Amino acid sequence: MVGTHSVFLKNSDFYMAHFDFIRECAHRYREGRINTTISPTDTMNDEHYLSAGRSAVDCILKALSATSITSVNRVLDLPCGHGRVLRHLVALFPDAQIDASDLEKDGVAFCEKTFGVRGIVSDPDLTKAPLRGGYDLIWVGSLFTHLRRDITQRWLAHLASLLSDKGIVIATTHGRWCEHIYETVRYISEDKWMKIVSECRASGYGYASYSRQESHHFMDHDYGVSMALPSATINDIENISGVRIYGYMERGWGDHQDVVVYGRPSFDTPWR
């Protein structure tokens, strides 16, 4: 009984430190100033621009609460665009080293100059991008929403390899809610959307490429729209060695995209 009581006290101390850390992050974000400078070339700028960043912070705080993280020293925002979420990450983790990476050189340069982060121009093959690794937190907003499943699987695993020993990836997907709002949010042409939905119903993951004029000139592989059932996303992460699944939030980001959280340490790390 003495040993059990001692373990309980140790765990109690840890959990208090964990909760204190999350509370401190939320407090600093609430009291901090969000840099609202928006690039004139930012194609994401709309009426939901700032609320999308605030929703990302909400997702991150929920994700942290499911982990054992008590500090975040190195952060990656991928793809950073022109800082839609990044400006909020800077306020949430003001003392962290933050990397902002994207294929769009203009966006990376803007983020580096405006938010004082380290800009990294990515690579069409993410596994070849010059990312330094050791990240405690990687935010991946609306990247896997545009990829074939085989690329998604490979990149999910690669991001895991860039984590610190307690790091997490927080990534968004088009989940099953998206089938119900297609009439409002037209992701792609109707014939291609029907293909995506059909594949998703059959296998859990559907994908169709944009037409060439809709796609980015810097992509050397298929780029389009995907939709994944939660079970498919969880299954793909289950096949990544050395990680555990911390959570899944349907419609977690902006009441639209699903959010999955996974990372270190491994699900099979022995008890102490």
Image: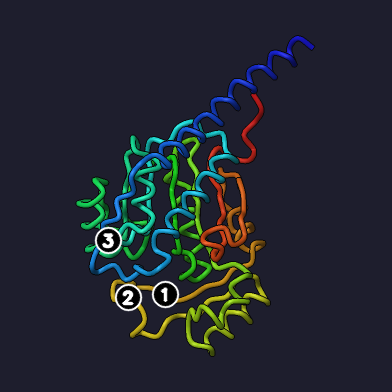
Mark 1 and mark 3 in contact? Answer it, CB < 8 Å. Answer: no
Which one is closest to the eye, mark 1 or mark 3? 3
Q: Specify which label sits upstream in the sequence, 2 or 3.
A: 3
- Picture coordinates of residue 169, whole percent (x, y): 49, 49
User: Residue lying furthest right in this view?
Assistant: 1
- Picture coordinates of residue 193, whole percent (x, y): 55, 83
Q: Amino acid at mark 1?
A: Tyr
Which residue is tagged 2?
Answer: 216
Identify the secondary structure beneath mark 1.
loop
Image height of 130 relative to 21, above or below: below
The answer to whether residue 135 of the structure is visible from this angle is no
- Looking at the image, which residue is at 24% across and 69% down? 41
Image height of 253 relative to 148, above or below: above
Identify the secondary structure beneath mark 2.
loop
Q: Specify which label sits upstream in the sequence, 1 or 3.
A: 3
Which one is closest to the eye, mark 2 or mark 3? 3
User: Residue lying furthest front in this view?
Assistant: 31
- Looking at the image, which residue is at 59% across and 85% down? 194
- Between the residue at mark 1 and the residue at mark 2, the CA separation in whole angstroms equals 8 Å
Q: Quadrant of the C terminus?
A: top right
Between residues 65 and 270, which one lies in front from this camera angle?
Answer: 65
Which residue is tagged 3?
Answer: 38
Between residues 167 and 242, which one lies in front from this camera angle?
Answer: 167
Q: Is residue 141 left or right of residue 218?
A: right
Q: Quadrant of the N terminus?
A: top right
Residue 223: mark in rendering? 1
Q: Amino acid at mark 3?
A: Ile
Image height of 200 relative to 153, above or below: below
- Picture coordinates of residue 50, whole percent (x, y): 39, 59
